[in-house]
């Protein structure tokens, strides 16, 4: 900020706040997601019979890995935001996606007519932080990524990022059965005899 410039600087609270808000929100998901899905599955199968619920089963290990992977994405975006004073397209895209994610939680709970993992922190952490951070960026005169494309990119990137981390978590945590012959299956070593 130069002398005479009335616009405030983007603080670490704005950029690293993304990681902090995400950590609070995902702590809720970490402790509730696997158990909630297991308990709600019969009701979900009855209400939404066309969804392949057996493919969406999540163990606690799967949830742990998926949240850890998403944490890496959010931490990298927050670091880019801090390094660029909030100007990073990656930071702005993840910030927009995070805010949209909070709204999605509210919609999920409305659809389910009750609690869903993440809905407790969505209206008190996720949405208020995202709104506040965007206001702070605007007040600091930070140009919004390509005229607001960050919001559209965040909207498009959110399901892709969620799909990628859950897909990778599935690959890393799925139980290998001996008949699958997967790469993690231990096979006896055999020596070739001359």
Image (cartoon, rainbow, N blue to C red):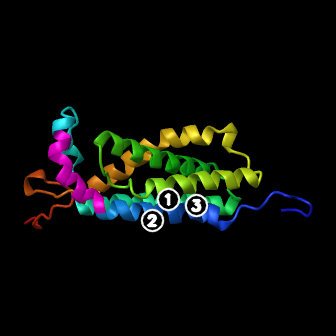
> Nearer the N terminus, badge 2 or badge 3?
2
For the view shown, which residue lies furthest in the top direction?
50
Q: For marks 2 and 3, give the CA distance.
A: 15 Å
Q: Which of marks 1 and 3 is nearer the N terminus?
A: 3
Q: Is the magenta stretch mostly helix, strand or loop?
A: helix
Q: Position of residue 108 (x, y in %)?
A: 35, 43
The percent coordinates of residue 75 (x first, y second) are 52, 63
- Give the residue at mark 2: 24
Instruction: Give the class, few, some or many, for how many residues have Cα within 10 Å of label 2's Cα (few <14, many ≥20).
Output: some
Asked if one can make out residue 68 in the rendered structure from this viewpoint, the answer is no
Crowding around mark 1 (Cα neighbors within 10 Å: few <14, some 14 to 19, many 20+) is: some
Give me the residue at 21% from left, 32% from top.
50
Q: Position of residue 111 (x, y in %)?
A: 32, 39
Q: How crowded is mark 3: few (under 14 residues within 10 Å), some or many (20 or more)?
A: many
Q: Residue at x 37, y 62 (%)?
A: 28
Q: Give the residue number, with chain letter if any, for mark 3.
A: 78
Residues marked 1 and 3 touching at CB (< 8 Å):
no
Q: Nearer the viewer, residue 123 or 147?
A: 123
Eyeballing the image, is 160 above or below 35?
above
Q: Disc 1 on helix, strand or loop? A: helix
Q: What residue is rendered at 16% in x and 61% in y? A: 185
Q: Is residue 95 above or below residue 72?
A: above
Q: What stretch is highlighted in magenta?
A: 32-45
Q: In which quarter of the image is residue 71?
A: bottom left
């Amino acid at each position: 900020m130069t002398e005479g410039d009335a616009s405030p600087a983007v603080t670490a609270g704005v950029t690293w706040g993304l990681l902090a808000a995400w950590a609070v929100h995902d702590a809720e998901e970490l402790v509730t997601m696997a158990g909630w899905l297991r308990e709600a599955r019969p009701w979900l199968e009855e209400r939404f019979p066309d969804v392949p619920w057996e493919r969406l089963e999540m163990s606690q290990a799967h949830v742990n890995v998926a949240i850890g992977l998403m944490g890496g994405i959010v931490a990298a975006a927050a670091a880019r935001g801090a390094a660029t004073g909030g100007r990073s397209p990656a930071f702005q895209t993840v910030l927009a996606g995070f805010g949209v994610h909070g709204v999605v939680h509210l919609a999920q709970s409305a659809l389910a007519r009750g609690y869903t993992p993440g809905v407790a922190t969505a209206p008190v952490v996720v949405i208020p932080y995202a709104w506040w951070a965007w206001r702070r960026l605007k007040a600091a005169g930070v140009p919004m990524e390509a005229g607001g494309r960050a919001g559209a990119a965040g909207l498009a990137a959110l399901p892709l990022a969620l799909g990628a981390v859950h897909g990778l978590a599935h690959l890393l945590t799925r139980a290998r059965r001996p008949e699958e012959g997967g790469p993690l299956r231990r096979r006896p070593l055999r020596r070739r005899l001359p």
